[in-house]
Image (cartoon, helix red, strand yellow):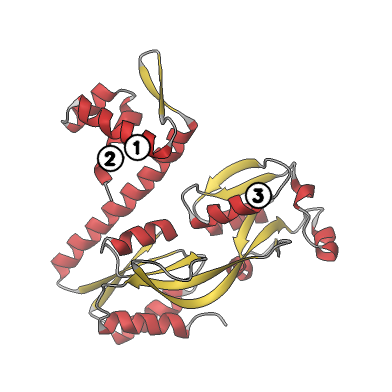
Amino acid sequence: MNTQTLEYIIAIAEEKSISRAADRLLVSQPAISRQLKRVEERLGTKLFLRERGEMILTDAGKIYVNGARSVQSIYEHALEEIRKLEQSGKRQITFIYNNALLPDFSVDILSEFRKLHPNTRISTIDGNASIAKDYLSNGMADLAVIATREASHTMLEFMPLRDEELMLALPASHPAVSSFEKHGVDLSLLRDEPFILNQQNSYFRSLEREILSHCSFTPDVLCEIRDLNASSNMVTNGKGIAFLPRSVYDHAEGCHLFSLPEPMIFHVVIAYSKGIILTGPIRDLIMLLLKNAPQ
């Protein structure tokens, strides 16, 4: 992961100038310009436009910078956890998961693990599949629970936990609820509804793009949210409609979930690097995850 590139782009966005960003970071202007050019060429789109002598973010640039700040925050959190670990002298397992996929982790699994290994600390990171794969592949995390439709991965081992379904979520009071219960989902009836979608770089957003590609309309996107539970709360409060995993149903009172015309099935798996040594604590954590997996 090149966090330096993220830092460069964020600095340009905040300073609205390549020269001021260079001064702030104590690097040359050509160095920052080259990094920006590489990123834009890789993405195939401009991140900035020049207006009145200032660098202004495009819509794509806003998405990139928001994502960059999230990644930078996770990375800094990881470094801080490492520093704390070195000071404490304890062993640590870095574990990445999405709370919506493991809602009972902190209550059930973590408490059982602490009884087995009181001197091993689990540092958790709330991250999507993209972040988890990157961290695992680069040795920055030990274990993750992710959503995927892949059966295998070149650098990671996958151990299945369960199959899940991405479903359409409507507020309980929505007028289409009774129709969908009787006749099934017809997305064309929702063309004028505000959609609450996942962030661009998330696995669930890729599934949403696949679902919406079959629609005859372009959805009105109210917002893009990283937290699936926050999406569920917005649906419950009538702010819009969303696509949510079936696993959030028990935690989504006032929210109706419906299977799509072509059910969107994905796998929830435990993932770890093919080169990792599975120590006793890591093996025990895997066993607890398997033991507590919903049937």
N-term-proximal mark, 1 vs 3: 1
Q: Is residue 102 visible?
A: no
Distance between the alpha carbons at the discs numbered 1 and 3: 27 Å
Find disc 1 in the rendering and name its residue. 39
| 238, 143: nearer the viewer | 143
Badge 2: few (under 14), some or many (20 or more) residues near its Cα, within 10 Å?
some
- Whether 130 is drawn above or below 93: the answer is above
Q: CA distance from mark 3 to mark 2?
A: 32 Å
The answer to whether mark 1 and mark 2 are in CB contact below 8 A is yes
Q: Amino acid at mark 3?
A: Leu
Q: Residue at x 38, y 80 (%)?
A: 286
Mark 2 residue element: helix
Indicate the quadrant where residue 263 lies. Answer: bottom right
Of badges 1 and 2, nearer the viewer stands 1
Residue drawn where x is 63% and y is 57% of the image: 243
Mark 1 neighbour density, 10 Å: few (under 14) some (14–19) many (20 or more) = some
Left or right of residue 76, residue 187 in this image: right
Image quadrant in which you'd find residue 8: top left
Look at mark 2 in the image and give the residue it sits on.
5
Residue 278 percent coordinates (x, y):
27, 80
Q: Nearer the viewer, residue 61 or 125?
A: 61
* Horizontal and vertical percent position of residue 203: 50, 57
